[in-house]
Image (cartoon, helix red, strand yellow):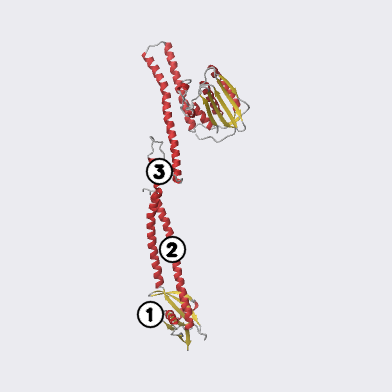
């Protein structure tokens, strides 16, 4: 079964809530009306019965009414009070007096029933052929020691007609209210959801070819604007991710194309030309170098991909950074000497960092390797370690060719390589600094680069001396 739309669901919910509210109000009004009508009927009966006591006289044991027949108020009262009226002798149960209206209803009690009414005075409802009759029973004691049962009645047909009329009216009002609520609710739901529909239409138009598009904001700073802002921020992240993927694809194709072209060219030469064993060996050695370059590229790429995917866990243990920096400096010094670059290492006092020693060693190696590769012969590279109560600061500085201001913000991106003049000084796939940033981020630190073209570069790494939550990859 197809689920209801949000518009229909909101309309149904609004209608259901209003139906419950109207039903509750109608029930309360109906109960109040019935109680008011009953109270009015009971008060009227009690007043008629109490007033009739003052006009009732007994002469020789026979009842009679003593009132001024010229008084219109008294005449009106007597007519109303005696319309449904009867009088019984309690001792014998004999009917002494009964109005014509009650006589026509055939309402006459046995002595036992008279005794019951005499013992249970007050209001009673009696069913007759013409509907219910409410009777007020009271005792009359004229002073002779004899008791009489006086009953004054009032038909409830008007009461019941008023109640039934009220019920019909309320039912019609509830039905009309529910219908109106459904229509208004559906209209209001559509009006409330119209901005959301506009956002959905705008989002539907955004595709892989126009990721720069953004959802419009209404400027009301409400929940819909908050939703549109959140979607735009997510869209910006997707656009950035797609741009990186495109850059990655182009860079990967470029990096693979050169060694593959070299391998193909050397193979074609080996097949088309006769060469001496020395020339064949030379070509094979060149191919091995290209194979090594491809292997290194793929290894770096897989390492970075696994690291960013969280497949390479980091160990947390105390790492003595001064000893680590000194050891790495000693290992890489022959590489610097081979390139005629002077390397100076200043480890400073003992500094403990909570982290993974293998990854921190790789971080230092990446920064030193970059500094040496892009330094000119006779150049200078310094590695300085300093400490503070909360941080360890690592500075790698060179006086090499530097980085252009346009390229500086992108050097930590995967496969990014600076201008051709810088790239021509050393081979690389542009993955080292991206991996270095990942290492620093996952140790809760910071990495910054400063550079002036033709004068050199400075990379500054700050690592906390205490364990800190890593930045999400």
Disc 1 to disc 2, how far (Cα)?
37 Å
Mark 2 is surrounded, within 10 Å at the Cα level, by few (under 14), some (14 to 19) or many (20 or more) other residues, namely: some
Q: Decide which of 277, 388 is in the foreground and name it.
A: 388
| Image coordinates for residue 20, horizontal then vertical, percent | 43, 58
Residue indicated by mark 3: 199
Residue 461 vs residue 176: left or right?
right
Question: Which one is closest to the eye, mark 1 or mark 3?
Answer: 3
Q: How would you rate the neighbour count of disc 3 (Cα within 10 Å): few for under 14, some for 14-19, many for 20 or more? A: many
| Front residue (pair 85, 203) | 203
Picture quadrant where residue 133 is located: bottom left
Q: Residue at point 44% right, 70% down?
A: 37
Let me know if residue 115 appears in the view: no
* Element carrying mark 1: helix
Q: CA distance from mark 2 to mark 3?
A: 43 Å
CB of mark 2 within 8 Å of CB of mark 3? no
Asked if residue 301 lies left or right of residue 274, the reply is right
User: Which residue appears farthest toward the bottom when viewing the image?
Assistant: 60
> Which mark, residue 27?
2
The residue indicated by pointer 1 is 104
């Amino acid at each position: 079964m197809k689920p209801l739309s949000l518009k229909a669901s909101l309309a149904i919910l609004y209608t259901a809530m209003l139906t419950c509210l109207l039903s509750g109000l109608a029930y309360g009004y109906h109960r109040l009306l019935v109680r008011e009508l009953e109270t009015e009927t009971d008060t009227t009966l009690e007043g008629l019965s109490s007033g009739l006591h003052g006009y009732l006289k007994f002469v020789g044991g026979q009842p009679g009414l003593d009132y001024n027949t010229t008084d219109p108020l008294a005449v009106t009262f007597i007519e109303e009070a005696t319309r449904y009226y009867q009088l019984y002798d309690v001792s014998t149960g004999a009917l002494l007096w009964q109005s014509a209206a009650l006589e026509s209803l055939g309402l006459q009690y046995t002595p036992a029933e008279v005794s019951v009414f005499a013992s249970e005075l007050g209001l009673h409802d009696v069913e007759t052929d013409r509907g219910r009759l409410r009777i007020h029973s009271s005792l009359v004691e004229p002073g002779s020691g004899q008791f009489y049962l006086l009953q004054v009645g009032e038909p409830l047909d008007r009461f019941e007609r008023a109640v039934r009329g009220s019920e019909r009216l309320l039912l019609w009002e509830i039905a009309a209210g529910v219908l109106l609520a459904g229509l208004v609710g559906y209209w209001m739901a559509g009006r409330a959801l119209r901005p959301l529909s506009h956002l959905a239409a705008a989002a539907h138009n955004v595709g892989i070819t126009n990721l720069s598009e953004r959802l419009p904001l209404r400027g009301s700073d409400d929940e819909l604007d908050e939703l549109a802002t959140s979607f735009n921020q997510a869209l910006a992240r997707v656009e950035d991710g797609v741009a990186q993927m495109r850059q990655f694809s182009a860079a990967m194709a470029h990096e693979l194309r050169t060694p593959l072209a070299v391998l193909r060219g050397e193979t074609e030469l080996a097949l088309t030309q006769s060469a001496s064993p020395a020339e064949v060996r030379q070509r094979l050695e060149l191919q091995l170098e290209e194979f090594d370059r491809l292997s290194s590229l793929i290894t770096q790429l897989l390492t970075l991909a696994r690291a960013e995917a969280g497949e390479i866990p980091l160990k947390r243990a105390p790492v003595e950074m001064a000893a680590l920096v000194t050891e790495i400096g000693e290992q890489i010094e022959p590489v610097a000497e081979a390139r005629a670059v002077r390397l100076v290492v200043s480890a400073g006092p003992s500094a403990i960092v909570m982290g993974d020693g293998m990854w921190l060693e790789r971080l230092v190696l990446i920064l030193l390797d970059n500094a040496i590769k892009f330094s000119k012969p006779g150049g200078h590279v310094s590695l300085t370690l300093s400490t503070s109560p909360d941080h360890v600061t690592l500075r790698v500085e060179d006086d090499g060719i530097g980085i252009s201001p346009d390229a500086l913000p992108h050097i930590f991106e995967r496969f990014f390589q600076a201008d051709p003049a810088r790239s021509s000084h050393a081979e690389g796939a542009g993955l080292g600094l991206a991996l270095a940033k990942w290492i620093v981020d996952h140790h809760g630190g910071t990495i910054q680069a400063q550079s002036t073209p033709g004068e050199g570069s400075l990379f500054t790494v700050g690592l906390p001396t205490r364990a800190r939550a890593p930045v999400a990859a």
